Image (cartoon, rainbow, N blue to C red):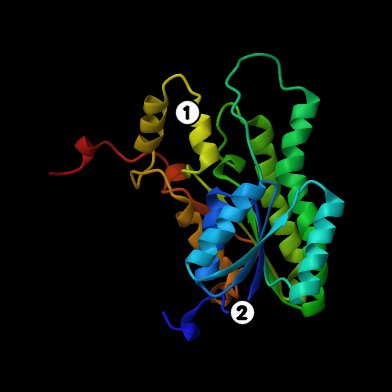
Amino acid sequence: MNQGQLKLQGKIGLVTGGASGIGRATCILASREGAHVVLGDMNDGGGAETVSMVKQAGGSAEFAHMDVTNESMVRDVVSNIISKHGRIDFLHNNAGGWHLDLSDNEMMPLDQWSHFLTLNLTSVFIVTKYVVEQMKKKQQGSIINMSSINGFYPNIGTLAYSSAKAGVIGFTKELALEVARHKIRVNVICPGEILTPLWRNTFDRLPDTTKAIATITNNIPLGRVGNPEDVAKTVVWLASDDSSYITGTVHVVDGGRTIGPPPDEGCWPS
């Protein structure tokens, strides 16, 4: 691929949660498309590893220690990026987390509820608040938020997570309206079952991991669990000028999971 064909040539991007999973895949793919990527994460070792992987692939990246729930830290990281690079062309609000609770006890304590809403929803507001300020000055930018199919297709045991991810969808649509006059686009991605370290760790703790994964896979029309790269491709497209007339939209990347399970093969004509 020659330089003229790179989707993100010369762009500066901030990817939160870039130390692993979808964030790491986004950093690698975005850099291959010509972007310089700043990845923010609390995992210093994983962040350094992502930067190394980007550079080994011939890309450009740097790491910033960043807690997306800490407003002053976020403000400082964004300020440093602007001082060094002059702008942020795209933001991928990817950082988040979840905990699967399959117990049938009383509802979770308030502090646990607050933790997951802060981590998955309020953090998106905090990072966006400081990035969008400079995007308005440049009158350009693309913000890609990370929700989940759980935001509209929830699973048992994800009350706080699903509520927060539904909030991210609403936040995206409202913000897209508010900043459109500044030529800033805001979109949201809802991944389905994606094979990230967090996903693996969750399923490894289930009583019958093999059965659980087989059940889920059987309910995905495309017949497989997704890879982080499946989502990263959509992030890069939304960050690029190829999607310049798209804002306020929800992009589901789930192999067809939310349209329902595939029909039994016996129902097809021979």
Whether residue 143 is visible here, answered yes or no, is no
Q: Is residue 171 visible?
A: yes
Say whether residue 70 is left or right of residue 230: right
Label of residue 222 in the image = none
The residue carrying pointer 2 sits among few (fewer than 14), some (14 to 19) or many (20 or more) residues within 10 Å by Cα, namely: few
Image quadrant where one finds the N terminus: bottom left
Q: Position of residue 235 (x, y in %)?
A: 56, 62
Measured along the vertical axis of the image, is residue 236 above or below residue 164? below
The residue under the point 80% across, 26% down is 110
Most distant residue in the left direction? 270
Return the x and y of residue 121 as percentages of the image width and height: 73, 45
Q: From the viewer's perspective, is 178 left or right of 41?
A: right
Q: Residue shown at 37%/37% (left/top)?
A: 217
In three-dimensional space, the C-alpha distance between marks 1 and 2, rounded to whole angstroms, equals: 41 Å
Q: Residue visible at 56% across and 72% down?
A: 243
Residue corresponding to mark 2: 10
What is the three-letter code of the residue carrying label 2? Gly
- Secondary structure under badge 2? loop
Whether residue 103 is situated above or below residue 242 in the rendered picture: above
**Mark 1 neighbour class, 10 Å CA radius: few under 14, some 14 to 19, many 20 or more:** some
Q: Quadrant of residue 148?
A: top right
Measuring 37% from the left and 27% from the top, which residue is drawn there?
Answer: 210
The mark that comes first in sequence, 1 or 2, is 2
Observer-nearest of 169 and 121? 121
Q: Is residue 17 left or right of residue 201?
A: right
Work out which residue is located at the far right of the displayed protein and give it. 72
User: Where does label 1 land, which residue?
Assistant: 204
User: In the image, residue 129 lies at what x, y percent?
Assistant: 81, 59
Image spot of residue 109 (x, y percent): 77, 22
